[in-house]
Image (cartoon, coloured by chain):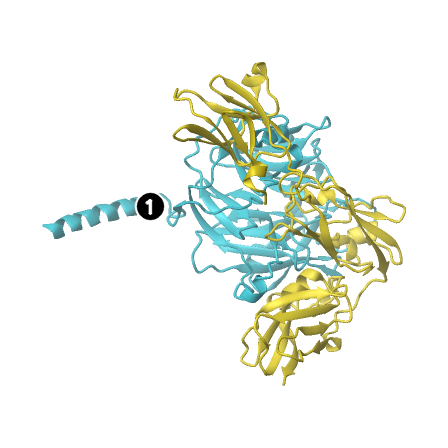
Amino acid sequence: MFSFSEMLAQTSPELIVDRNYLSIKRDFDESANLRVFKGQITETELSSATMLLGKVVKEETSIRFIPLVPFGWNQEYTVVYNNIMDHFVIDLPDSYEHLSIETVYPSGRWVPTNILKWYIKFSSPINETNVYHHIEFIHSLGDTISKVILPLENALISDDGKLLTLWVEPGRQKRDLIPNKQLGPVFEKDKRYGLIIPKDLKDNNGVPMQEDFAHIFQTTPPDRQKPDTNSWKVLPPENDTDDLVILFHESMDYGSTMNGLTVINAEKKVITGDWQLIDNESISLFTPKKPWSKGNYKVLLDVTIEDLAGNNLNRLFDSKVNDTIPSSRYSSSYFALSFSIK
Amino acid sequence: MKTLVTFILALILSFFGSTVQADSSLKANFITGDPGITSINSMTFGPENILFIGDSKSAQIVAIDVSAHPKADNSEVKIDLLDKLIADMLGTKIDQVQITDMVVNPINDNIYLSVHHSSGIPVLLRVENNTLKQVTLDNVSHSKATISDPINKDAKDKWDRELRKWAVADMKYSSGKIMVSGLSNKEFASTFRSIDFPFTKKQDYGSLEIYHAAHGKYETHAPIKTFIPTKIKGNSHILAGYTCTPLVVFPMDKIKPGEHNKGRTVAELGSGNTPIDIVEIENGGKRYLLIANSNRPLMKMEFDDLEAYEGSLTTPVVKKGAAAGVAYVNLPYVNVRQLDKFQGNGFLIIKREANGNLALKKGNSWWLEK
């Protein structure tokens, strides 16, 4: 957020603008129209120029224009009111915090060739329009690989606009589908690749990143095993404020794992707290909101928790038709890990 | 006396009340106000000037009454540099706007465009005299239903983690139901829901599990990209287009909540492609399908051929990029980004032309004649 003084730009004594409105001293000739245009428009161009959408509000001594979407940084505009024609620009403050990428999931260097999803965590909300066109995968020679990401028209993004989900083209990752047969899987084993986001990607204010982003990873053979919950280990907290620790022994899918874990007590009441994934998403930590009480607990594991290749606790991502369990995916079913605090 | 006045007043009110209801039972529970739309991913028209808006951000479907919008004369509709026009109207740059959908009201051929701006503000526009007018959404006659996951909606602790997102891919109305397809970021699944309309408080969310088997061997839980409800040999079906690009039919009477429904793949339209929109158009007593694609020209398929095809594609298409199943014709329209039915037996498109111009224009219905 920026302070009012940073946003305020005054181009003439009568004109006050910030990103959300423009205000000008009111002329009491009621027929006077307030109009705003993008760019530097000349008088001769006025009749054919496109007016900005917005609301005009008449106040006691001034008239205000509220654009439908905020005025852009470093964008020229023309304002026309009665006999006034003026141009203005709202300069990007020097202190502006440019968009950057905080992390990607999976965060580790090694991923199976049949990886299904990536998550990108940004420092601030992004411009979602056609966002998937801004993300590329390259192989070790630097060439872009085509048809890696599932082309979605609407971005899969968290409510705060900062966490973007990418699906690696599932048709190529699933065995025997036409894209898989004709184009082959997206990644080959034992190769290095890069996930690249060029700096032209903008934030929700229309300001681009300052640096290109690259995350280099290396592929391991495909993972065609369901996560084995029998091998998962719960380390119960030793003190009443300690974290609960769950060891998965493999990197897990960030989204489904963060969503899929719940701790309940013996009375089946949900224990509230914060989850995080560490050590390349192979360990989960749970910090309870209140200190632990003595007793028996369970960690409920939603069956839709997936490993990096989209294999969940019930089925492989590309299971054969006769292996599937009808309708199980929509019933609330859980696996559970028990622990007790003495 | 007071009792009599009250009685007469009650009588008058009940008379007006019932008149309004008789006018439109579908809009009986509509209220006027702000439906709180925070994104427009998909739109479709139902009967009686009802525009449905799929809002993924607020996880809701909103039905809006647009009968107050006068009929625009769109007989000679053509808008060039559509993306530039929208960017100019918003005072922004072209790479900060995205047209998310285009629909035509079948009652009066009014054309609506939904736009997403980088700020996250959704914009609804209506075509008038070959330019665009804003349709405000903060005070409209509407009714809405939530599309939150019916299974996990009570798991508040999990919802606090806010990772799960669901994006509406397509939405269609048919016989008292609004059907929605989409994809979540959590699980790769063919999420397909059917919601009764008029919306009620006690909503039955049919979460339908429908899939197509790839050559009978591997099951694909792929999400439906675009679909239409239609009749095949007189029976109600869903005709669905998937990425890369099988066309699959599902008999409506077999789609039931909680049951696994396997569709019949009637065509493969070639790999490296995604269907964008499907419309059904009747012209000269013949029914046609038009399919707009991300990476193939506009396709025309005849219903006679679709109905005559009783098989199901079970063997892989060996020849790279080749099509199989029901025959179709490629029409000379490439890079069609949006498609809808227009003027009864014609079609309207938004297409990127070879010189870069993004144009909204009529298709030539000559292509839909025998």
Q: How many marks?
A: 1
One can see residue B109 in this view: no
Q: Quadrant of residue B221?
A: bottom right
One can see residue A235 in this view: yes
- Residue B2 vs residue A237, the one in the foreground: A237
What x and y, as percent, mark residue B7?
17, 51
Q: Secondary structure at mark 1?
A: helix
Please give the chain letter of the residue carrying mark 1.
B
**Chain A palette colour:** yellow
Type of the residue with mark 1 = Ala
- Residue A26 vs residue B130, the one in the foreground: A26
Q: Quadrant of residue B69?
A: top left
**Chain B palette colour:** cyan
Q: Residue furthest top?
A: A44
* Up/down of B251 relative to A55, above or below: below
Q: Residue at x 57, y 78 (%)?
A: A265
What x and y, as percent, mark residue B341?
57, 36
**According to the image, label 1 marks what residue?**
B22
Q: Residue at x 75, y 56 (%)?
A: B314
What x and y, as percent, mark residue A83?
48, 16
Quarter of the figure that contains the C terminus of chain B: top right
